Image (cartoon, rainbow, N blue to C red):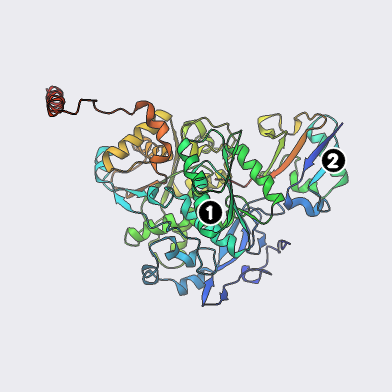
């Protein structure tokens, strides 16, 4: 199964300017991101901290729902879903 | 093409591409030198950037305060316009072609009757309901769109809980810009009408504010020539809130109050009021070393920052909002952690109040001071009352409460309990009978 990961403008220099990346998913969001990091290794340090947790100012949405209201990086992903990586600092 | 970050060891005046005190035609100056990441300190040029490309931390405008100090004075400010632009040297714009509907220089009212009711001897209301579109958002939008035009951005946009929608739609007209305003579909009717009237694009999103905000962040990546007031030009936009501090100090005769109470939505306004008071000292406009205590106010139905404060956390856990104070219904506040830092470092407090307390406070402010606040103003005053009850405000402290939005925008909140005194026929006899009963009731009450 595969999912689409939307990459914000701030990270597109690391994906060759591409804003949507198709990734073969294998269960959890963490596994899906790991799969994406194989192709774009420099993305990892921008999205996850040294302990492997989501960085403080990065939000991830699976099908438009904040993963903090789901199972975090353990959130299950399914075929065809869209995952959005979004800078947390906005609004107000 | 955006410029990348530069090494954090670089001094701000050496930032490639940055406007290091740029002199432009007409002798105008910009003292904004760079954007600095609040987390990792990396520097960026003064462009349409709002987060660090390395750590995603927020970018803050840096200034050459020494140069500002040499340029600005109480006298020069007094000669300026009666608007936020009298403090232009402390705002991140270059020219004087402002996108300006007259935001700012709103009254600071000595609240004698309310103060007496609450047992406070030196209470003041900053009445920001009197801005052009009825809220403090006119301050930040005036700065945001002025900067957007300087940066060559062609479309004005925002994610809004209503007040910002009004202000962006109105200022976009003044700027001659196309506008796209994104709002939650369940917004108060008055806030929708007072946005659509300006004729721009208003898109209602079937979701809450945080959904709208996320969508706008995604759109920003696809439409780099748009100025999303609270996304890609947020670093400049938020600077407009500093004028809430500048004005209060000037209106108090260039003195800093002891304590201010500020509503918290994203937390940006609170942190910028703190920055504003600090800057007055940095540039020599204030010599008083006193630190103003800053307290924050949230509605109980959306109180992630108040919860973090009470629980002693240095992080803010997002919530799903459910409150009548829709302009504060931000479940995932971008500046929540910074608001916590400011409140803790200044010895302030953060409290949350119920919808009933909010409505009671709106009525109290209206019936004591003649100021009709929107629900966010009710939140702020209700939190002041909580702080008084908890003994966290000295009766002689000079306290300023920021009332940042007009009650005409949120009349639905009061509608269920609003009633006329009586309905009578158009006859003098009927009215005299009404008056007789009323006076009789008053006398009964006295007994």
Q: Position of residue A3 (x, y in %)?
A: 82, 35
Position of the N terminus of chain B, as image quadrant, is: bottom right
Dot label at residue B10? none
Residue B274 in view of the camera: no
Dot label at residue B238? 1
In the image, B297 versus B323, the foreground residue is B323
Residue at 43% in and 63% down: B280
Which quadrant of the structure image shows residue B150?
bottom right
Mark 2 and mark 1, same subunit? no
- Vertical arrangement, residue B215 with respect to residue B186, above or below: below
| Mark 2, residue position | A22
State the SS at label 1.
Answer: helix
Subunit under mark 1: B
Please give left or right for residue B278 compared with residue B439 in the image: right
Which quadrant of the structure image shows residue A85?
top right
In the image, B162 versus B114, the foreground residue is B162
Subunit under mark 2: A
Label 2 or label 1, whichever lies nearer to me, is 2
State the SS at label 2.
Answer: strand
Position of the C terminus of chain B, as image quadrant, is: top left
- Vertical arrangement, residue B274 with respect to residue B358, above or below: below
Please give left or right for residue B132 compared with residue B430 in the image: right
């Amino acid at each position: 199964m595969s999912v689409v990961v939307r990459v914000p403008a701030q990270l597109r220099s690391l994906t060759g300017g591409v804003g949507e990346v198709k990734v073969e998913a294998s269960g959890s969001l963490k596994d899906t991101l790991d799969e994406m990091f194989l192709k774009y290794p420099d993305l990892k340090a921008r999205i996850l901290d040294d302990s492997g947790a989501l960085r403080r100012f990065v939000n991830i949405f699976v099908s438009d729902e904040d993963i903090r209201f789901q199972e975090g990086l353990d959130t299950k992903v399914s075929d065809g879903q869209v995952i959005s990586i979004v800078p947390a600092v906005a609004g107000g | 093409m955006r410029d990348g970050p530069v090494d954090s060891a670089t001094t701000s005046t050496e930032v490639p591409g940055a406007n290091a005190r740029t002199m432009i035609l007409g002798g105008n100056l910009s003292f904004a030198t760079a954007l600095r990441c609040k987390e990792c300190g990396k520097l960026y040029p003064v462009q349409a950037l709002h987060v660090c490309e390395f750590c995603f931390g927020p970018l803050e405008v840096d200034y050459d305060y020494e140069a500002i100090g040499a340029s600005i004075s109480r006298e020069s400010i007094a000669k300026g316009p009666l608007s936020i632009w009298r403090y232009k040297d402390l705002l991140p714009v270059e020219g004087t072609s402002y996108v300006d509907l007259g935001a700012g220089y709103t009254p600071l009212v000595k609240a004698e009757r309310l103060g007496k009711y609450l047992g406070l001897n030196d209470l003041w209301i900053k009445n920001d309901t009197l801005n052009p579109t009825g809220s403090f958002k006119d301050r930040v939008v005036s700065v945001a769109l002025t900067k957007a035009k300087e940066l060559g951005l062609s479309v004005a946009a925002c994610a809004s809980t209503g007040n910002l929608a009004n202000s962006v739609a109105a200022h976009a007209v003044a700027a001659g810009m196309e506008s796209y305003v994104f709002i939650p579909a369940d917004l108060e009717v008055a806030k929708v009408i007072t946005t659509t009237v300006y004729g721009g694009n208003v898109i209602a999103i079937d979701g809450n504010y945080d959904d709208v905000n996320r969508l706008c962040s995604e759109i920003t990546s696809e439409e780099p020539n748009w100025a999303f007031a609270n996304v890609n030009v947020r670093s400049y936009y938020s600077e407009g809130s500093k004028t809430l501090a500048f004005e209060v100090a000037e209106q108090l005769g260039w003195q800093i109050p002891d304590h201010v109470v500020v509503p918290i939505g994203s937390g940006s306004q609170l942190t910028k009021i703190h920055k504003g008071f600090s800057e007055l000292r940095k540039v020599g406009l204030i010599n008083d070393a006193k630190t103003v205590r800053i307290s924050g106010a949230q509605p109980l139905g959306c109180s992630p920052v108040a919860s973090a404060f009470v629980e002693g956390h240095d992080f803010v856990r997002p919530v799903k909002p459910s409150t009548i104070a829709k302009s504060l219904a931000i479940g995932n506040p971008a500046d929540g952690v910074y608001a916590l830092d400011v409140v803790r470092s200044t010895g302030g407090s953060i409290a949350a109040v119920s919808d009933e307390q909010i409505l009671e406070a709106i009525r109290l402010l209206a019936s004591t001071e003649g100021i009709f606040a929107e629900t966010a103003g009710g939140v702020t005053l209700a939190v002041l009352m909580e702080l008084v009850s908890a003994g966290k405000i000295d009766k002689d402290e000079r306290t300023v409460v920021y009332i940042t939005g007009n009650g005409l925008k949120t009349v639905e909140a009061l509608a269920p309990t609003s009633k006329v005194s009586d309905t009578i026929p158009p006859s003098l006899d009927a009215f005299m009978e009404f008056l007789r009963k009323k006076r009789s009731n008053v006398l009964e009450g006295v007994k």
